[in-house]
């Protein structure tokens, strides 16, 4: 197989009709912490960050689309006084892809991509011009994609690799 990949994180956001009721004391349902104005709870394996008077929530640590449903159910079990969740959207997907060769030359010769190197960073950053998706490519043939809104945004990156002659 030429390519093999996995979702490493799906970041979502949603809104609540009324502020969530969180218990700041030690709680059996979730662990709670606070950073500046952001309250963070860890419930099951998911992280929920509350902003805007506890009516805006960021959700991270989902590894699949099924995890989103599991996370929302966990949220409803852990947090009291949640009546309506609305405006749920995928903000960003991170994806790890393992290639069977080092694909940097493929992107360097393609006008759809910007390539940037960083002096203290071992990888090379490749950015797709129209979608703003970023991919960090490492010599270990690992490719880490960030900023995806859907997995379809991998297509320009993958089609460049698939169309390379003499790669099996």
Image (cartoon, rainbow, N blue to C red):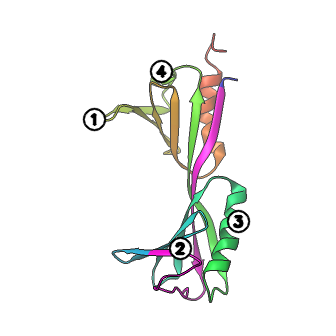
Mark nearer the N terminus (1 vs 3): 3
**Mark 3 in CB contact with mark 2 (< 8 angstroms):** no
Q: Is residue 37 left or right of residue 142?
A: left
| 148 in relation to 136, above or below | below
Which residue carries the number 2 mark? 57
Figure quadrant of residue 82: bottom right
Mark nearer the N terminus (3 vs 2): 2
Which residue carries the number 3 mark? 70
Give the number of the mark in front: 2 or 4. 2
Which mark, residue 107?
none
Mark nearer the N terminus (2 vs 1): 2
Which residue carries the number 1 mark? 120
For residue 12: magenta?
yes
Which residue carries the number 4 mark? 109
> Which of 139/125 is in front?
139
Residue at 51 percent of width and 86 percent of height: 23
**Mark 2 in CB contact with mark 4 (< 8 angstroms):** no
Give the number of the mark in front: 1 or 3. 3
Figure quadrant of residue 52: bottom left
For residue 106: magenta?
no
Position of residue 130 measured from the top left corner of the image (x, y, whole percent):
51, 42
Q: Secondary structure at mark 4?
A: loop
Write down the region rendered in magenta. 3-32
Position of residue 122 measured from the top left corner of the image (x, y, whole percent):
35, 31
Give the number of the mark in front: 1 or 4. 1
């Amino acid at each position: 197989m030429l390519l093999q990949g996995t979702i490493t994180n799906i970041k979502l956001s949603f809104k609540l009709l009324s502020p969530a009721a969180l218990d700041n004391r030690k709680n059996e349902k979730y662990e709670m912490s606070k950073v500046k104005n952001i309250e963070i709870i860890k419930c099951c394996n998911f992280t929920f960050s509350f902003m805007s008077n506890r009516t805006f929530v960021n959700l991270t640590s989902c590894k699949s689309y099924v995890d989103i449903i599991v996370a929302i159910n966990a949220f409803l079990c852990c947090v009291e006084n949640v009546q309506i969740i609305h405006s749920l959207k995928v903000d960003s997907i991170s994806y790890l892809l393992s290639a069977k060769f080092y694909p940097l030359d493929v992107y360097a010769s393609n006008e759809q991509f910007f390539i940037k190197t960083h002096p203290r960073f071992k990888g090379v950053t490749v950015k797709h011009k129209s979608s703003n998706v970023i991919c960090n490519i490492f010599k270990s043939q690992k490719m880490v994609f960030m900023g995806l809104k859907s997995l379809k945004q991998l297509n320009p990156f993958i089609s460049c690799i698939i169309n390379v002659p003499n790669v099996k």
